[in-house]
Amino acid sequence: MLSNCSSGSDKNFNPDTCLSKNTQALLLQEMVRYASKLPPHATHQTKFSDEFNWYYDRAVSECRIMQCYQEETDTSYLILIARKARSITPMEEGFAIRIKFDTSQKMKYYEEVFRTWKMPTDTLNKRGKFLFETLVNGNDLTLYHSKYQRDRYIEFPDERFYFDKTLRKWNDRELDTVRLD
């Protein structure tokens, strides 16, 4: 069930007042199939197969919804998610997604707006909140890209990587244009 969430000038981005616990769990289950690396032996065409549920269940257990904002419609949201990062020291990475639900609460639209660099949890909590509020307020995030801030804030998008909304995955402008024939 979708809940009332912050909108307009109200700046409480608590995910528990934005989305029900059940909707949060469903969202994470669907989202990890796009945001996580592919399971062993999976392809982008087979990643939705039930045989990979074990992999995605583990991926969900490493994620938490940090912030949520309901956009203009009742079914459109901006969400900030943190997940454990592969690192020698405990780190997390964050990513902001824009999603839309259909009337049966299935995800009909998925877009990753940005991904942060790996950082300690307390740092991600501060920087992630700042970036999310900047995004919600409609301000440009370009100054927080790697070109200007190196590895402090946003890792993607950048001059090389962009999110393909149709394929629902990050693409590489350089490697995706290389022809091997």
Image (tube, rainbow, N blue to C red):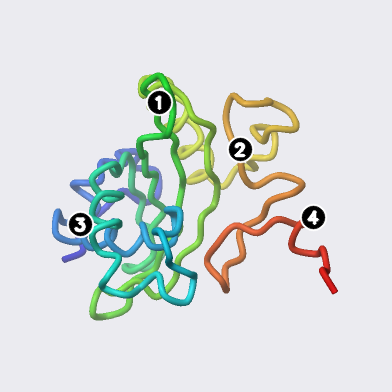
Residue 135 image position (x, y, % from top left) = 52, 44
Q: Please state which amino acid type lies under the numbered disc 3.
A: Ala
Q: Are marks 4 and 1 in contact (CB under 8 Å)?
A: no
Residue contact at pointers 2 and 3, CB within 8 angstroms: no
Q: Which residue is mark 4?
A: 174
Q: Pick whichever of labels 3 and 1 is earlier in the sequence.
A: 3
Q: Earlier in the sequence, mark 4 or mark 2?
A: 2
In the drawing, does residue 60 fall left or right of residue 45?
A: left
Rendered position, 171 above or below 154: below
Mark earlier in primary sequence (1, 2): 1
CA gap between label 1 and label 2 equals 15 Å
**Which mark is nearer the camera, 1 or 2?**
1
Give coordinates of residue 163: x percent, y percent. 61, 58
Mark 1, residues whose alpha carbon is within 10 Å: few (<14), some, or many (≥20)?
A: some
Q: Camera-side residue: 129 or 164?
A: 164
Out of 24 and 131, give the one closest to the viewer. Answer: 24
Residue under label 2? 155
Q: Nearer the viewer, mark 3 or mark 4?
A: 4
State the residue position of label 3.
Answer: 25
